[in-house]
């Protein structure tokens, strides 16, 4: 089958790097990339043999350490001009990675300053934050929209981003026309088919992962639970708890949107695809010890299923299917449940107190019935965990 999306070169690079990760099922990875095993092993063999066409960039030294200071300064400025948001540390590391002995980081900084490439951030420097990090890839993905970005054709784009918490690997950057649940679900299906399923998502409390009425039971969350993917919510009014995603968005703004205006969705998506390749495979990441995210990421061993099955319940459970209203019948009365469960099957199980029942979606209690009181149904309170996964 042909390579799809972005360019063949980017596809081959990403495939090869992921295939070389320890424990990766290479035949399954070929299937996710839409290529035959023969094709996948061919490109992998060429990469392992040092084929320059598949490498991130040529390993041939760009300059000899004995060349003049003018040549070194030219090279430093060339890297900076290709990546205007990169600082001295990243530039020095790239030069070293390409086979030369770079000048000191302070010297690189001075070259940038002397040639007018340094723009100090408002308010001066800030202290680095200590951030939580998951132990392995795919334990937690962070997902968010990067606000509303106007296009030259007067349309509004809402960039959807998904990054892996452990490796910072950018799994998805999509130019979306809205922030609706169906749009997110469509993009996630594409991402799951390529990279497999994560254990959980970390999101904020806004739409579409949160409900405008304050409930966290949304159609998107229910769909993810049926796939075995949990949803973890950040503490309200604490954007610092989602520091990785916020930092990723700052990089996206600085390296893609700065001083540029895109004509339409297609042009912007091409820019996203190009930058995602640079971010994952070329751009040194200081939080990773100047490694690139691709060196720490490998696809999930849990593939996206072809068909999502209904939740199974025990034989002694009282099972009801939620009506369009949305309500369920129990003990001769109709009880309201969160609208996210329309059409789903829920179980009613007795609780410890007489006259009290819990309404469950699988193992998750979503509401309670109190036959002794006047209220019909009370939603289960979902307190935010004091431990942030970021």
Image (cartoon, rainbow, N blue to C red):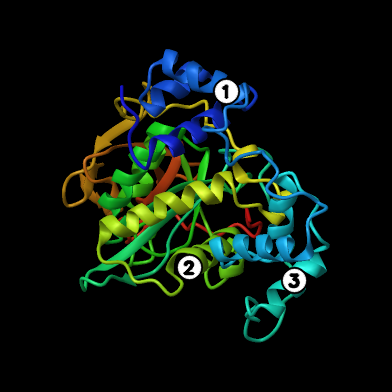
| Quadrant including the N terminus | top left
Identify the residue at image location x=55%, y=46%: 280
Which x, y percent locates residue 220? 34, 48
What residue sits right under mark 1 in the picture? 24
Identify the residue at image location x=43%, y=15%: 37
Which x, y percent locates residue 33? 40, 28
Q: Which of pointers 1 and 3 lies earlier in the amino acid sequence?
A: 1
What residue sits right under mark 2 in the picture? 253
Tell me whether the residue at label 1 lies in contact with that at label 3, contact meaning CB atoms closer than 8 angstroms.
no
Q: Nearer the viewer, mark 2 or mark 1?
A: 2
- Relative to 197, residue 107 above or below: below
Residue sticking out furthest to the top: 38
Q: Which is nearer the eye, 260 or 163?
A: 260
Q: Which structural element holds mark 1?
A: loop
Q: Which of pointers 2 and 1 lies earlier in the amino acid sequence?
A: 1
What residue sits right under mark 3 in the picture? 109
- Relative to 304, residue 341 above or below: below
Badge 1: residue crowd in 10 Å (few <14, some 14–19, many ≥20)? some
């Amino acid at each position: 089958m042909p390579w799809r999306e972005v360019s063949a070169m980017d596809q081959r690079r990403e495939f090869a790097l992921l295939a070389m990760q320890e424990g990766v099922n290479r035949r399954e990875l070929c299937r996710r990339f839409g290529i035959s095993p023969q094709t996948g092993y061919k490109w992998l063999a060429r990469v392992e043999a040092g084929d320059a066409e598949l490498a991130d960039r040529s390993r041939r030294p760009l300059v000899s350490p004995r060349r003049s200071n003018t040549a070194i300064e030219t090279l430093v400025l060339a890297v900076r001009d290709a990546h205007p948001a990169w600082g001295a540390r990243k530039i020095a590391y790239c030069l070293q990675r390409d086979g030369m002995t770079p000048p000191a980081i302070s010297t690189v900084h001075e070259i940038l300053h002397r040639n007018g490439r340094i723009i100090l951030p408002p308010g001066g420097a800030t202290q680095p934050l200590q951030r939580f990090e998951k132990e392995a890839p795919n334990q937690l993905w962070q997902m968010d929209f990067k606000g509303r970005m106007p296009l030259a054709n007067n349309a509004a784009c809402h960039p959807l981003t998904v990054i892996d918490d452990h490796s910072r690997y950018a799994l998805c950057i999509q130019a979306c026309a809205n922030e609706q649940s169906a749009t997110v679900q469509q993009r996630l299906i594409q991402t799951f088919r390529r990279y497999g399923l994560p254990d959980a998502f970390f999101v904020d409390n806004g739409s579409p992962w949160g409900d405008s009425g304050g409930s966290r039971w949304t159609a998107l969350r229910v769909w993810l639970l049926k796939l075995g993917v949990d949803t973890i919510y950040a503490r309200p009014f604490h954007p610092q708890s989602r520091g990785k995603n916020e930092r990723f968005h700052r990089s996206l703004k600085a390296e893609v949107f700065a001083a540029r205006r895109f004509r339409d969705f297609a042009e912007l998506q091409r820019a996203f695809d190009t930058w995602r390749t640079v971010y994952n495979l070329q751009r040194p990441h200081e939080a990773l010890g100047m490694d690139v995210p691709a060196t720490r990421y490998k696809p999930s061993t849990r593939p996206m299923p072809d068909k999502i099955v209904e939740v199974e319940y025990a034989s002694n459970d009282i099972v009801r299917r939620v009506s369009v209203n949305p309500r369920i019948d129990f003990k001769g009365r109709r009880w309201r449940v969160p609208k996210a469960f329309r059409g789903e099957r829920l179980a009613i199980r007795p609780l410890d107190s007489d006259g009290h029942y819990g309404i469950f979606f699988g193992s998750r209690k979503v509401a309670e019935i109190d036959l002794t009181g006047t209220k019909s149904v009370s939603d289960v309170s979902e307190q935010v965990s004091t431990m942030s996964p970021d």
